[in-house]
Image (cartoon, rainbow, N blue to C red):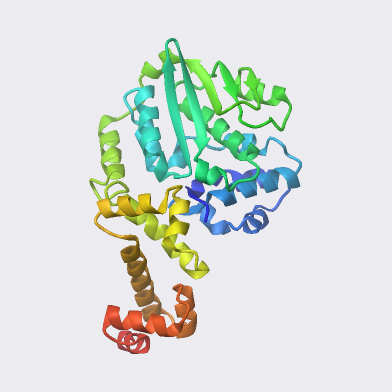
Amino acid sequence: MSSLIRSSSLTGFSALVASLGGQPEQLLRQAGIPPEAVGDPDEYIPYRSLVAVLDLAARRYDCPDFGLRLSTHQGLDILGPVGVIGRHAASVRDALDGIARFLYQYSPAIEIAIEPGGSMAEYHFRIRPRVRRSLIDLAQIGELSMGTTLQIFRMLIAPDFSPLSVSFLHRPLAPTATYEEYFGCPLAGEQDRWGFRFSADVLDRPVEGSDPAVRRLANEYLSGAVGGLGSNGLPAEVRIVVKRALPTRRFGLEDVAESFAQHPRTLQRQLAAHGTTFQEIVDDVRRELADRYLRTTKMPLAQLADVLGYSEQSSFSRSCRRWFGSSPQAHRTAAA
């Protein structure tokens, strides 16, 4: 499995494809993305699928700057609760630090960093190595990410903000003038990283309209203080991955660890720190789904066992006796 990213990363995709005369749902399905997921702010999609659908659209509609165009539809809002941290920070520096800290909740596949250096500062974006190795063409996702970053900086600093220079890891696909007009500065392609340089003094600017109370609540939510995605967030994220992977039979520890760009032992240690194990999460997800399907559907037991990732119906039956104290059919009958 590849790592995940919130489906809000495709905000504006359907409108852009339609404007090019295409059919967005067809492209999404071809890349393995359920079209209904794009409109659900709580849904996650495989990062690899996002990369694939951007490249597919750019090639099919002869639109080399597709990723850059898509970024004009995006900004802080695509980050969900992480964006709230940025929007209500005391300063631009605090906003970027908060986004960097919690960005894994938007996608564990990526990370950002701000490196001050005297009068200049540098922003860097990267795809984590374990994820990057599984990807073929990074140009469109790189341009989408850099373009969206510019939109976020403009929301935090000023609508007319432009960096001093921009660097791309890849060779730009559209004419250089296209990028220099968009970013408002010179572009250097085929560098050792994606990023841009800007004046460091903007980091101390206050964020207009920020509310300390809202930021505090968002920080508590993301830190898990009120049941968010911090202290018990990793188990919740693992549950999401396991639930979607059960029917594919690719829900083993190594598969799920890869989706978080982590080593399996690292994931096990982090889950242990949250007071649970990978095996307990898988068992709990199966129990929850089995109870729901047995109560609310007439799905044949053999098919249900397959949906839950069991290779044999007998294994499913043994689990039901352990969970519910009865066979699957007896549990269904009692619920009816």
Q: Residue furthest front?
A: 265
Which residue sits at x=34%, y=65%? Answer: 279
- Which image quarter holds the C terminus? bottom left
Above or below residue 123? Residue 285 is below
Total residue callouts: 0
Q: Provide residue 286's location: percent of width, then percent of height.
A: 37, 71
Q: Is residue 20 visible?
A: no
Above or below residue 34? Residue 150 is above
Q: Is residue 126 left or right of residue 257?
A: right
Q: Provide residue 86's location: percent of width, then percent of height.
A: 38, 32
Which quarter of the figure has residue 83? top left
Q: Residue furthest top?
A: 119
Above or below residue 175? Residue 259 is below
Which residue sits at x=50%, y=46%? Answer: 8
Above or below residue 335? Residue 44 is above
Which quarter of the figure has residue 163? top right
Q: Provide residue 197's location: percent of width, then percent of height.
A: 52, 18
Q: Is residue 111 left or right of residue 183?
A: left
Which residue sits at x=35%, y=22%? Answer: 91
Q: Provide residue 28's location: percent of width, then percent of height.
A: 62, 55
Q: Is residue 226 visible?
A: yes
Q: Is residue 137 left or right of residue 105?
A: right
